[in-house]
Amino acid sequence: MRMNSLKLAASAFLIAAPGLAFADEEAEQMMQNALPLMYHTCASVVEEADGNEEYILDVVGKMTALSLYNRQVDIEAHATSDEEKAALRETFVAALKEGCAGDENALLGGVVDNAVKSTLGL
């Protein structure tokens, strides 16, 4: 169940990413939304979600957006077509799985950030 939940959450990688041309106010709000969730581990987000996959999607989406913003990434520079976005999504899902499979107690924010980094070749 954990990996299926992370698969769903990985779609947040592309949902949260379009453009990332945030104004300062938007960036501040994004940080305020993500920072209270940074305590999550791979296991705790699934446990806290208690079957609500939308919660997992929301948490991973916020962490992904923060990672992309911090790295000043414009996802459109990496994928413009549906096929390219699907390939990024698959790569991101695999990186999330790998990061959480190695340590379910790993901080999810770090796993997400590493998945962003490896997916985009940064």
Image: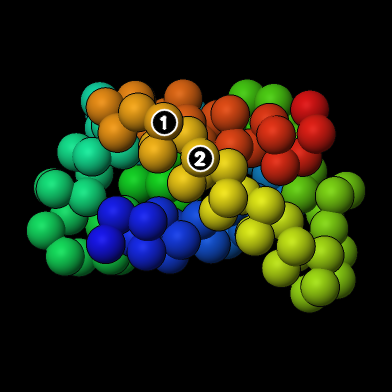
Say the numbered circle drawn on residue 102. Answer: 1
Please say if 39 is above or below 11.
Answer: above
Q: Three-letter amino acid code at disc 1? A: Gly
Q: Nearer the viewer, residue 64 or 118?
A: 118
Quadrant for the C terminus, please: top right
Q: CA distance from mark 2 to mark 1?
A: 6 Å
Q: Do labels 2 and 1 touch, CB within 8 Å?
A: yes
**Relative to residue 55, is residue 86 drawn left or right?**
right
Residue 121 sits in which quadrant? Answer: top right
- Dot 1 lies on which element? helix
Label 2, residues with CA under 10 Å away: few <14, some 14-19, many ≥20: some
The residue that mark 2 highlights is: 98
> Residue at left 55%, top 53%?
93
Residue 51 location in percent, x, y?
16, 65
Residue 40 location in percent, x, y?
26, 32
Residue 53 sits in which quadrant? Answer: bottom left
